[in-house]
Image (cartoon, grey):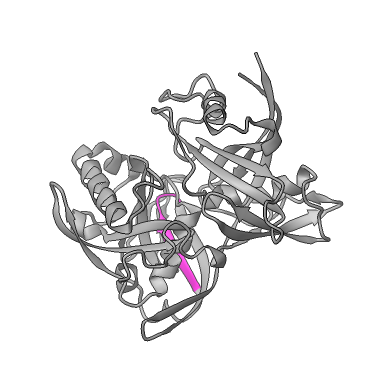
């Protein structure tokens, strides 16, 4: 067998296998074969590899020297298929991105700069930049801290990710269709209104009630409703078609079911969640299943949509909740917040800041055998 050095890291509510770019084959077909063997795909249990048989844990990150002068490192993300021998290279994971800066420092690719280090990351997949700020000490990442992320046990050191430079990441435009709201003609479903936005990733937002949902449904309830899953997939495919991204990625856009906040049961803790500080309730469908937490890139897009007048998400934002820059999203495993600063004049929408906060942890380093 051959062996490859790798690091397993958690970033936010995702976990992935990190490689130094020099460890992998340059040829994309050979690289794909190697990564599929590392993760253990295709197999619904991924029993013969490092994958966790879930969309949140079937991920890889490839970190290399910067190909741009204004970046510290290059970041290539791959979402590995579970039951199909595929890797989607057409986007990047916002949660896992929290671990990119810490990985780069701990691997000696970027020098720590005092108690706070900012790593400027060039996201090769989408030709955009991301700034990752985190605590460092004695030249290494500080992982311990008191910041909690819903969907992750315990606490860790707070990591700031600013996505303001990722507008139009996949389509080249904040509004791929040029409108804050569209009417989709969906096969075997009919008409449904949707708002499609592209900030770090593309998300199509629809009202939960338009699919007969009230927000109290569990992820298992939704995943087991095959008619609903098929309808959501058809809505997602139609949103991909009118956004002109079908050829770029098989998994985008994500589909978000949004509504006003109502009490819901936290998937991770079993507790009933209060709605006092929640701006919007949203559940995401992606890769054929419901996301058990909330995608980081989707969080950014949702926060921006909440601030955009005329969008479906903005319909559910109470006037008082929209006065400050923080948008708090309720999801299956708790809440996630994003700080959004923007200016809107007539038809012009300018995004000045889109930051969320995560934790990360270096779990294992060593060799994987293939």
Q: Is residue 48 above or below residue 312?
A: above
User: Quarter of the image holding residue 135?
Assistant: bottom right
Residue 160 in picture, x, y percent from top left: 63, 61
Q: Residue furthest top?
A: 1
Q: Is residue 276 visible?
A: no
Majority secondary structure in the magenta region: strand
Q: Is residue 185 above or below residue 6?
A: below
Q: Is residue 56 visible?
A: yes
Q: Residue at x 64, y 31 (%)?
A: 24
Residue range in magenta is: 326-333
User: Quarter of the image holding residue 7?
Assistant: top right
Q: Residue at x 62, y 48 (%)?
A: 75
Is 254 included in the stretch rendered in magenta?
Answer: no
Q: Residue furthest right?
A: 138
Residue 215 in picture, x, y percent from top left: 29, 56
In the image: residue 80, left or right of residue 205: right
Is 330 included in the stretch rendered in magenta?
Answer: yes
In the image: residue 102, left or right of residue 10: right
Rendered-image quadrant of the N terminus: top right
In the image: residue 195, left or right of residue 306: left
Q: Nearer the viewer, residue 174 or 218?
A: 174
Q: Nearer the viewer, residue 257 or 129?
A: 129
Q: Residue at x 61, y 42 (%)?
A: 10
């Amino acid at each position: 067998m051959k062996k490859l050095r790798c690091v397993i890291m958690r970033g936010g509510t995702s976990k992935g296998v990190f490689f130094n770019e020099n460890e992998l084959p340059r040829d994309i077909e050979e690289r794909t074969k190697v990564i599929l063997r590392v993760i253990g795909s295709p197999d619904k249990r991924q029993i013969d590899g490092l994958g966790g048989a879930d969309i949140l844990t079937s991920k890889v990150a490839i970190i290399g020297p910067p190909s741009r002068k204004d970046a510290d490192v290059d970041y290539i993300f791959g979402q590995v298929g579970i039951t199909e021998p595929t890797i989607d290279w057409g986007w990047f994971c916002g949660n896992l991105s929290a671990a990119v800066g810490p990985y780069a420092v701990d691997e000696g690719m970027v020098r720590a700069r005092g108690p706070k280090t900012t790593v400027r990351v060039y996201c090769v997949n989408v030709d955009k930049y991301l700034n990752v700020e985190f605590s460092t000490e004695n030249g290494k990442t500080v992982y311990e801290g008191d910041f909690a992320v819903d969907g992750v046990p315990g606490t860790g050191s707070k990591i700031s990710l600013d996505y303001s430079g990722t507008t139009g990441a996949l389509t080249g435009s904040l509004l791929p269709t040029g409108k804050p709201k569209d009417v989709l003609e969906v096969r075997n479903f009919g008409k449904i209104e949707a708002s499609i936005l592209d900030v770090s990733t593309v998300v199509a937002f629809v009202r939960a009630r338009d699919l007969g949902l009230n927000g109290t449904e569990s992820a298992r309830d939704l995943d087991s409703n095959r008619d609903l899953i098929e309808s959501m997939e058809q809505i997602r495919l139609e949103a991909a078609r009118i956004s002109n991204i079908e050829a770029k990625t098989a998994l985008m856009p994500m589909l978000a079911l949004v509504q006003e906040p109502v009490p819901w049961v936290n998937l991770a803790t079993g507790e009933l969640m209060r709605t006092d500080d929640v701006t919007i309730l949203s559940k995401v469908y992606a890769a054929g299943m419901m996301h058990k937490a909330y995608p980081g890139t989707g969080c950014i897009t949702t926060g921006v949509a909440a601030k955009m007048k005329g969008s479906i998400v903005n319909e559910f934002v109470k006037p008082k909740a929209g006065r400050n820059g923080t948008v708090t999203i309720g999801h299956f495993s708790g809440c996630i917040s994003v700080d959004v600063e923007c200016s809107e004049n007539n038809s012009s929408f300018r995004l000045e800041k889109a930051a969320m906060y995560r934790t990360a942890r270096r779990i294992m380093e060593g060799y994987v055998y293939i």
